[in-house]
Amino acid sequence: MAHNVTTWASLLLEGTTRLREAGVQLPRLEAELLLAHLAGVRREDVLAGTSGSPVRGLAARYRRAIARRCGGEPFAYIAGHKEFMSLDFAVTPAVLVPRPETELLVETAIARLSGVARPSAVEVGTGSGAVAISMAVAIPALRVWAVDVSAGAVRVARTNALRHGVEGRVQVVVGDLLEAPGLPPPGTVGLVVANLPYVPAGVFGRLAPEVALYEPRLALDGGKDGLEVVSRFLPQAARYLPPGGSLGLECDPGQCTLLTELLRQAGFEGIEVCQDLSGRARVVWGVKGGKAD
């Protein structure tokens, strides 16, 4: 075996086998994508074997990557990027891996900004910047301020803003929720979105290892009931938004009823619950009550 020539096919077979044995859900696909990423070629080239034999040293790097994935490290951290809203975002262990269900928050925010002459928004808990940047790409006139308490996350978000050419319209700042230097004055921005930590602290032991062991707990831990950060944030949002301003929050489906009540208590009206593709409540919107100036 030691004298066999390493080929694309043999590496794929080895990677697929190891990933399957480790319980990875899509072992063949991930084996193909990892190999293509490390080789700097298209997945189609790997499948067709049109790139010839793997370059020197690739097999060793591929096996190390496969070992990391078998150990539970998220694919996106190994590859260094993740697709979201059909855009490619750099990701590191400083940020959560962007998830498909969060696209609903972006889609509903875009719909609410439709027709606004000079749209502006604030995103709180930006992480990789995927939400704010996707909104800015979709709406060329939009100006967004993106906030995160983590300096590491802010660096990743700024990198992604540059990657997608929206650094002039997406300002990323370090701050604690809406108490962040560099944000516009209260009452001047009509829409705020947030994907804040909402995992109850007691649930961490039941999370998938690739989430509990690798993704930043700061971005996940919502305290005892999962809503500690949200409960602190809502009064800030009520003070920050003008009357008629919109607030959109991603939430755990099981928290939806309580979250809508918290929004009402904070002075929000017109509560709308949006369901994801699986029919589960995923995003809640509210409009700040009172009369606009």
Image (cartoon, grey):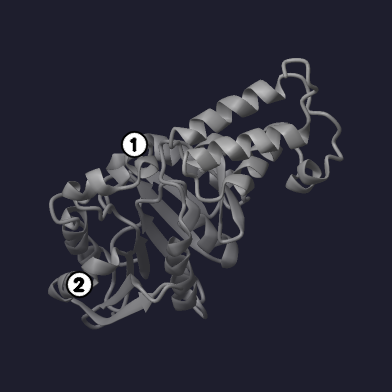
Disc 1: CA contacts within 10 A as few (<14), some (14-19) or many (>=20):
some
Compared with 121, 56 (above or below) is above
Query: In which quadrant of the rendered image does the C terminus lie?
Result: bottom left
Query: In which quadrant of the rendered image does the N terminus lie?
Result: top right
Residue type indicated by callout 2: Leu
Q: In which quarter of the image is residue 185?
A: bottom left
Q: In the shown orientation, is residue 247 left or right of residue 64?
A: left
Residue shown at 50% from the left, 35% from the top: 69
Mark number, residue 213 = 1
Residue shown at 42% from the left, 54% from the top: 145
Q: In the shown orientation, is residue 241 left or right of residue 130?
A: left
Is residue 221 something one can see in this rendering? Answer: no
Residue shown at 56% from the left, 61% from the top: 85
108 and 37: which is toward the camera: 37
SS for dot 1: loop
SS for dot 2: helix
Mark number, residue 263 = 2
Residue type indicated by callout 1: Leu
Q: Give the Cα separation between the discs numbered 2 and 1.
A: 32 Å
